[in-house]
Image (cartoon, helix red, strand yellow):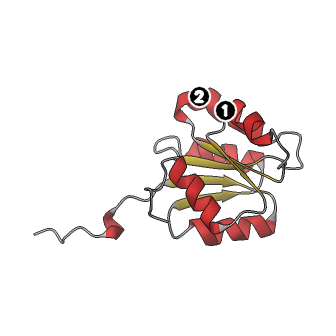
Amino acid sequence: MAPPESATDIPRPQVLVLEDNPEALLLLRHYLTPHAHVTFTSTVDEALAADTAAELHGYDLYVLDINLGEDRDGVDVLHTLQARHGPDNVRALALTAYALPGDRKKFLAAGFTDYLSKPFSREQLMHALQDAQVLPGGGA
């Protein structure tokens, strides 16, 4: 006889994080790991390699820092992911220090599902995950 279903039986979403700032990475690790299976990367090459390795199961959400201090940024990574999987199959959260009027609209127009400016709170991140339909509403 199968044991009764519990909250731990609910599949946790697969999330790939690309963030080059160690403090932000630590914060994201603290906020996300209780709610999702998370792959943490700090370079574009690591993130794209992790995505390639996960091709069989894919990711439910990509959390992409925009300014990576490399020759490619989070927008470039998003476009590479969209080319691989199709634009309608990639849900991505832009994570950025860019917080000027119009920045949100710019990143949504670039293909991101949502936008979160730094610094961010746990509640803001959980709300963004709910909006992206990665976490159930009210589950934060």
Identity of the residue drawn at 66% across and 54% down: 17
Q: Quadrant of the N terminus?
A: bottom left
- Nearest to the observer: residue 51 or residue 79: 79
| Number of numbered discs visible in the structure rendering | 2
Dividing the picture into quarters, in which one does residue 39 lie?
bottom right
Q: Nearer the viewer, residue 124 or 76?
A: 124
Q: Quadrant of residue 129?
A: bottom right
Q: Is residue 21 visible?
A: yes
Check the image and report above or below for 53 versus 107: below
- Say above or below: 134 vs 85: below
Can you tell which mark lies on residue 111?
1
Pointer 2 residue: 87
Residue 86: give x, y in percent of width and height.
56, 27
Q: Secondary structure at mark 2?
A: helix
Q: Position of residue 51 (x, y in %)?
A: 60, 44
CA separation, marks 2 and 1? 8 Å
Residue 134 falls left or right of residue 63: left
